[in-house]
Amino acid sequence: MPTNFVQLMLDHAAQRPHAPALREKEFGIWQTITWGELAVLTRKLACGLHGAGLRAGQHIIIVGDNRPRMNAVMLAAQALGAIPVPLYQDAVAAEYVFPIHNAEVEFAVVEDQEQVDKLLDVRRQVPTLHRIWYDNPRGLRHYAEPGVASLDTLIEEGAEVYHREPWVFDDGPKKIQPDDVAAMFFTSGTTGNPKGVVHTHHSLLDRALAGKKFDRLTESEEVLAYLPPAWIGQNIFSYAQWLACGYVVNCPESGATVSIDMKEIGPTYYFAPPRIFEGLLTSVMIRMEDASPLKRGLFHHFMKLAKRVGPALMDGQPVGLLDKLHYALGSFCIYGPLRNTMGLSRVRVAYTAGEAIGPDLFTFYRSIGINLKQLYGSTETAVFVCLQPDHEARADTVGVPCEGVEIKLAENGEVLVKSPGLLKEYYKNPRATAEVLTAEGWYHTSDAGFIDAHGHLKIIDRVKDVGHLKGGANDGAMFAPKYVENKLKFFPHIKEAVAFGNGRERVCAFINIDMEAVGNWAEKRNLPYAGYTDLASKPEVLALIRECVEQVNADLARDALLAGSQIHRFLVLHKELDADDGEMTRTRKVKRGFIQDKYQVLVDALYAGKPEQFIETAVKFEDGRSGSVSATLKLLDAKTFPAQTQQAA
């Protein structure tokens, strides 16, 4: 079998040249690129890049949404032995400076005018970036910047180069070795500059094949590529596994059309972080509130049945005949139309990862017949470390080690991993590499967890974030902030949460409401509001969030280990946490330390027992302008509950 991605693509093109490889929706119509057409396009791009000066070992950045020609550029760069580096398309220009400087980038391929403008801005600080090609020419006709050209021009030049020097492409893929670098992905940089994670063809392809074997993936799968290509999860599913399996990757027209495009394509293999599944369910529940009493009654009746029977059916457990017949009727009336509404009617395998998913949310999808499972991995492990087998999917674990993976626990509870998919190194950062890779080949995940009685891995939190309360009745009790935050985010009305408590007597929290869910809730109650800040400060909304917090506390009280982590006080922030304001990473992970420093006055006010606190915060708007948002926030107490140690035992 081929040992590099380019040769895999060429094999598909040779064996089934007319089979669809990629689809892109443009002007409302799906356009198909076959494997044969992809091979020709890749050849022209590779030769064009060679003619422009790109050589083996050099880096080329790729910035944009999922587009067929972006995948072809990845392949073209790899065919030359060069290293593609995808960057987040929604990052501000300043965030590109470090990766471009660190990787000594001279070449870039971007999607459109927005990305061209950002890179031209960056070029003033990183003059080595001298060639930029764009895919979408809209708005760029009159640009006269040196080194800026369309991808069409590069393709035309590549055809001429191939005519003169066919060996550039014909011989290139044959020279690629499994241990050659295939791509570099920059981490989100929650605590400093991002690190360039170097992966080889072998590390990425091995994990892609392990996932293929585990879920019996074939060339018949349909995948929707809508998450950032710079995120390794999207890259594995829509690039590495795409080439390993030969299935079809579909690129939506835009982020706004994803839900419509999902219904049209009907993906069979689907991957999304929990927030996407939360959003799908929230939209369903909002629509149900607008339905007639009869439809609402039928929905709740059959969902109650699904919650009781559905997971057992998904897990292959015995179910009574009457329940089966009743469920089949529910599938015809409710579950089937519901799956179709969400675009998940054909899904055979669905995965979620990145954050913990709420038990109720997880059960909901499995109860209506969607084979939703969890996986565990990271950029450094090429994603696939643990996977949940069919019939063994549970909300509180992330599965069993997949083929080729070994797991052990350090004395402090940290999960250590040995896998063929481990990173080669952090680029130009031997110190960081030595910190995470031992001489014996074990990778330090920085996650705290344990193996349960069934051999499944459970993740508690990041090792550095697991702390202890100090003083008071809960002195010495464990505090796992992410565990608490995820429990809060299980509620559809809560979008983000940040918990504090390490080294303190009690736990306090910041909360972001979900604007869509809470806005709809407010409208149903004729509660007027003028934007996020106004809605978040409404007494009725604060009471709603207090109910959610107290439900979390009641749940925590039943866990002997984490009962001390109940939230004593909280506030609802006056603005949404935003990556543009430095409060989150591009993968929507909160920067807890940054937030604590930025909002120290609010943290101090919570612990001081103040009833309210004024705050003014600088923000960046979507159009690039800067401004500020101010408000006097209410600081609220929440009911806590005695630890039910005997029940937990």
Image (cartoon, grey):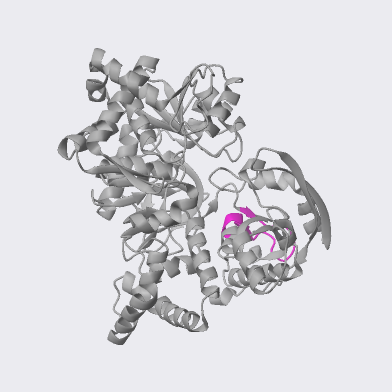
**Vertical position of residue 290 compared to residue 561: above or below:** below
Residue 443 appears in the figure: no
Residue 565 pos. (x, y %): 64, 63
Point 21% across, 43% down: residue? 19
Residue 186 pos. (x, y %): 49, 34
Asked if residue 59 lies left or right of residue 508, the reply is left
Quarter residue 574 falls in: bottom right
Asked if residue 492 lies left or right of residue 8, the reply is right
**Vertical position of residue 219 compared to residue 422: above or below:** below
The number of numbered discs placed on residues in the rendered structure image is: 0
Residue found at the very far left of the displayed protein: 15
Nearer to me, 343 or 635: 343
Point 49% across, 23% down: residue? 103
Residue 16 appears in the figure: yes
Asked if residue 437 lies left or right of residue 530, the reply is left
Nearer to me, 131 or 84: 131
Residue found at the very far top of the displayed protein: 164
The magenta stretch is 467-483
Nearer to me, 561 or 490: 490
Residue 539 pos. (x, y %): 76, 69
The quarter of the image holding the N terminus is top left
Residue 283 pos. (x, y %): 52, 65
In magenta segment, residue 102: no
In magenta segment, residue 478: yes
Point 27% across, 49% down: residue? 212
